[in-house]
Amino acid sequence: MTFDELSEWLLVYVAVMIGQPSETLSLDMTLRDLDMDSVDSVNLALELEKKFEVPVDPELFLNGDKSLNNVLVTFWEQLAKAPKR
Amino acid sequence: MNVDQLEPMGRLMADAVLARELPASVEMFEPVERVSVHTSKLGLPNRAWLRFEAAGKTYIFSSGLLAEQIEGDSSNAWRHINGDAFSLMSDKHALKNHLLSHGFSVPNGHMYRRRNMAQALAAFEAFDGPVCVKPNSGSEGIGVFPGITERSWFEIAIEKVAELYPKIVVEESVSGTHFRFFYIAPHIAAIRMGVVPSVEGDGRQTITDLIAQKNRERARRRLVSHLPIETNRNVEDYLAMQGYRLTDVLAPGEKALLSGVSNGGAGAETILVDDEVHPSYRRLVEKACQSVPGLNICGVDIVIADEKKPAGKNNYWILEFNNNPTILGYHYPWEGRVIDICGCILNFLMDRAPSTDPQGMKKTYGADL
């Protein structure tokens, strides 16, 4: 999966989660803009773990000031380093 | 062991632990919880935890939160006693959908994100009767606004919840008697009836005077579970919704509610009941809890239209499951037979594969003091 494909996947995931079309969302939006709470963070982390078979820390999505792009970049870097389970 | 460092629930549990001569200590630390393969803070930071051992496992307890140490985990992490069920129970809307899909009655309603305020505000018109507004992941009745019948109050409630929480639940406000069933897998250990706090007029005293009178009785009885009722903004707002002010004098027999929630923290009285509630509700709540994989201990809030009649499709509504249920009211009820809920929890921990004999279970888990 490329970074762009991951970005697209995340936008669709978040769109489904908050019940809005993905076209109305952008990677510049912060987690606070999206009203993500700890429940969403854990669910997203578990979903990513399942999808990529790597450990994902839910705290990655708990800082409301971070944009989707911020967390994507961080996760992408972690993904590159993480050993596959 | 310095038990005085513990909060009241911790002290109660410590008494039960010591009575069983289980190894125990009091420790100040900030435990981390394991979520999947990562750890995060368990909550309740900077406090004293009761740490104890039962049947070869190590547990910590504070303010109703019980966690077990993960065996063989090098990071010294803990797992909530409800394990994987914790997340579902923390998400009121998801839990409601789960219960609905398993055939249980829940209040009709929707969840809105704060960013969709217009949709949330438009929801009021969809309800024929009173509406309840509450946070999707709150606890202890904080931010819960039941019984709303006017649009202006609905808007205030939505704004208040949105100030503090990103997700807002709007649902029908169901009427009936509020109960908290204390579940310790696989059975109900105790049933608490929560009497919403109210004052009754005598034609002379103001509402403030009547609350003070109520508080004098509370002070006299000195029950840690029934602290004085605070006359705060929430009380003023709830009175205003009914058209009252604190300075109003109620006519003889006239009743004003001080809150719409039945939590002890909101001033509700705890009445412990047993046979007063039709036995079908015990079975129903047990089944509801057993439908959530991994659920071990919780408080189930349920409204029952008529508790004398058997459970049917439209005469009860399960409101929510509480991961960290308070235990004080079972040891110090306002009325009713005391239930040693700490002892029940410890019995469960000491035997994680209890008997399936209902009578045997009642003896084991519902032991009176």
Image (cartoon, rainbow, N blue to C red):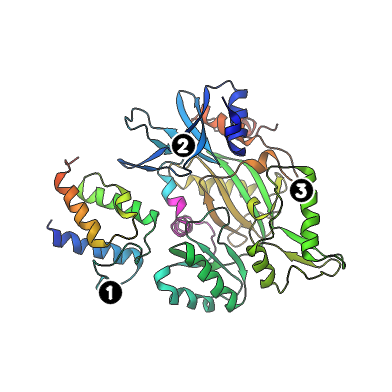
- Callouts 1 and 2 close, C-beta under 8 Å: no
Q: Say which quarter of the image contains residue A62.
A: bottom left
Question: How many marks on residues?
Answer: 3
In the rendered structure, the answer to whether residue B201 lies left or right of residue A53 reads: right
- How far apart marks 2 and 3 lie (CA) works out to 33 Å
Is B146 or B108 nearer to us in this picture?
A: B146
**Which percent across, then down, holds residue B39?**
34, 41
In this figure, which residue is indicated by the disc labeled 1?
A: A24
Where disc 1 sits, the SS reads: helix
Give the prevailing secondary structure in the magenta stretch.
helix
Q: Name the image quarter holding the C terminus of chain B.
A: top right
> Which numbered dot is residue B67?
2
Type of the residue with mark 3: Arg
The segment highlighted magenta reads B88-107
Amino acid of disc 1: Thr
> Is B217 rendered above or below residue A70?
above
Residue corresponding to mark 3: B218
Separation (CA) of disc 1 from disc 2: 41 Å
Q: Judge whether residue B213 is colored magenta.
A: no
**Three-letter amino acid code at disc 2?**
Ala
